[in-house]
Amino acid sequence: MFMGEYQHAIDQKGRLIIPAKFRDDLGERFVVTRGLDQCLFVYPQTEWKQIEQKLKSLPFTRSDARAFTRFFFSGATECELDKQGRANIAANLRQYAKLTKECIVIGVSNRVEIWSKDIWEEYFSQSEASFNEIAEKIVDFDL
């Protein structure tokens, strides 16, 4: 399970340090793709295969299913870590998530998310006030 929040810088070649606590669970090869809310989603191969199966089962006759599948798979790329624990993030993905220097890498249960620091801080501050309300609607157990 992935959890925690880490700040790292992406270098000019597009390399980003993946936190050491995430490396074993991601494995040697993992998938990075466009995520929602203008971040990147990072999946271990096993989790990616499960998502692939779910998306394959969507009815291709529905335009929204086709649109999301295109969005999700067209941005996907397989990555691996170098000896320093860095992943090379593709230029199109860096552009999508506006990754220029400071990045936030967070663990979100079955995936890792990579955010521009500025976008993460804006998202978090805008969402913080509604977290209690959201929890009341979707969480049906005591935290």
Image (tube, rainbow, N blue to C red):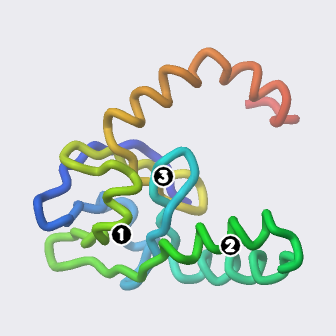
Q: Residue 137 vs residue 19: left or right?
A: right
**Residue type at the position of mark 1:** Arg
Q: Residue 71 vs residue 80: left or right?
A: right
- Give x and y (percent) for residue 115: 39, 47
Measure the alpha-carbon separation of dots 3 and 1. 11 Å
Q: Is residue 97 above or below residue 12?
A: above
The residue tagged with tag 3: helix, strand or loop? strand
Going from N to C along the chain, the mark reached first, 1 or 2, is 1
- Give x and y (percent) for residue 107: 48, 52
The residue tagged with tag 2: helix, strand or loop? helix
Foreground tag (1 vs 2): 2
Going from N to C along the chain, the mark reached first, 3 or 1, is 1
* Residue topped by disc 1: 23
Q: Is residue 45 above or below residue 111?
A: below
Asked if marks 3 and 2 touch (Cβ < 8 Å), the reply is no
Q: Would you call the spot at circle 1 few (<14 residues within 10 Å), some (14-19), or many (20 or more)?
A: some
Residue 69 badge: 2
Residue 107 badge: 3
